[in-house]
Amino acid sequence: MREDFAFVVANLRQTNKQTNKISSFYLIFKQSQFYNFTLHICAEMKYFGETVLQCRETASRGSGKKPFRFFVVPLQQNSKHNKMKRTLLILAGAVMLMATAGCKKDDQTDNNNTDTEVGKHIEKIYLQHTTIMNGDTTSTEGRTLFQEWIWDDNQLKTRKIYDDDSTVKSTHNYTYTNGHITRIVEQTLTATYRTDFSYNTDGNVVRSLYYHNDTLIHDYAYSYDASGKMCRFLYVQHLFDEYGTHTTDTTYRDVEWTGNNITQIANHEADTVGTTYTYDNKHNPYFGIVESGRPFAWASENNAVKINDITNTYTYDNEGWPTSVAYDLSTGIITINYKTYYEYNK
């Protein structure tokens, strides 16, 4: 039994006499920037084909932020790793917090499988904005090409992002495995960004890892209730200071549904508010095209016409696909109206 695990303060080995199978339980003390300490009891088991510790918090004392309730931490494979790397492994491993036991079963039986919907596909996206001061329009920027989407049948293969001068700012290339997006590589003039996705057996995305030049900077993990609907996601932001010191900032969100649309994402920080969504009953052209981040855009079947206090005003074609969406951002004196136009390839 490996015991090269940071902060292990006690362990107990138990043997089943009938099977001669050894189960190991650990008592782990964990300290981080989020709270003073937590005490966990952990059991070693198999998870996604690898040996892990599965833990539950038994006691905590801290600054008031809610700590993790349940998480899975991969075991070190090499006992020569130094203590700092083992400590970072605990923090990074917390991204496997998939508190499925805490998710309520949704009454709906439809799941949010993220296969790309067969229908119209976005080909080009244009942007336009108008500035209004004290009720008078002061300037209107012409419609400019913002994105170009290139498809291979029903799979999005390349997405080009354009600058204001119509030059390509970045290119996103998509890789698929068994019909699911498993990698997005974004190439700019100065950097490479990569997002890797993994899925469960039901075809729902459970993890997305976002890298900047091969350095992990964002980490999302998604969990699902018994009906297959996403019920929670965990977000870990990996931070590095000017000395290269690595820290993490971790939050998690509960997801609520009405039908096949996410209607609320609830925050768990005492000093933050959640997000509520109201929808139309039209086609969402982004549905099923997974991206790293909050899932309402790609997991909901319809279009969000209101996000908290921001109202989105859509126009549609005769088949119910959005042709434009507009919203206002106001400072009280100056209001900027943003408008997005969609062109489809069929």
Image (cartoon, helix red, strand yellow):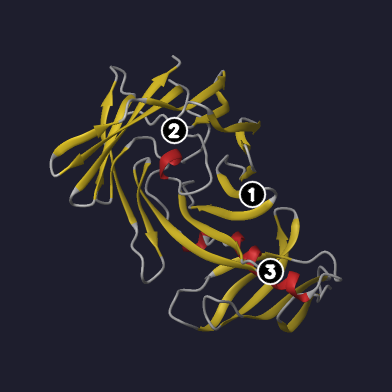
- Drawn side of residue 143 relative to residue 202, left or right: left
Q: Which residue is drawn at 37% across and 40% down?
A: 260
Where does label 3 land, which residue?
88
Which is more N-terminal, label 2 or label 1?
A: 1
Q: Quadrant location of residue 95?
A: bottom right
Q: Nearer the viewer, residue 287 or 314?
A: 314
Three-letter amino acid code of the residue under disc 3? Leu
Q: Which of 30 and 158 is in front in this view?
A: 158
Q: Residue at x 75, y 57 (%)?
A: 50
Q: How crowded is mark 1: few (under 14 residues within 10 Å), some or many (20 or more)?
A: some
Q: Are marks 3 and 1 in contact (CB under 8 Å)?
A: no
What numbered label is drawn on residue 286?
A: 2
Image location of residue 21, percent across then percent down: 81, 69
Q: Which of 228 and 277 is in front in this view?
A: 277
Question: Looking at the image, is mark 1 or mark 2 nearer the viewer?
Answer: 1
Three-letter amino acid code of the residue under disc 1? His
- Drawn side of residue 183 relative to residue 6, left or right: left
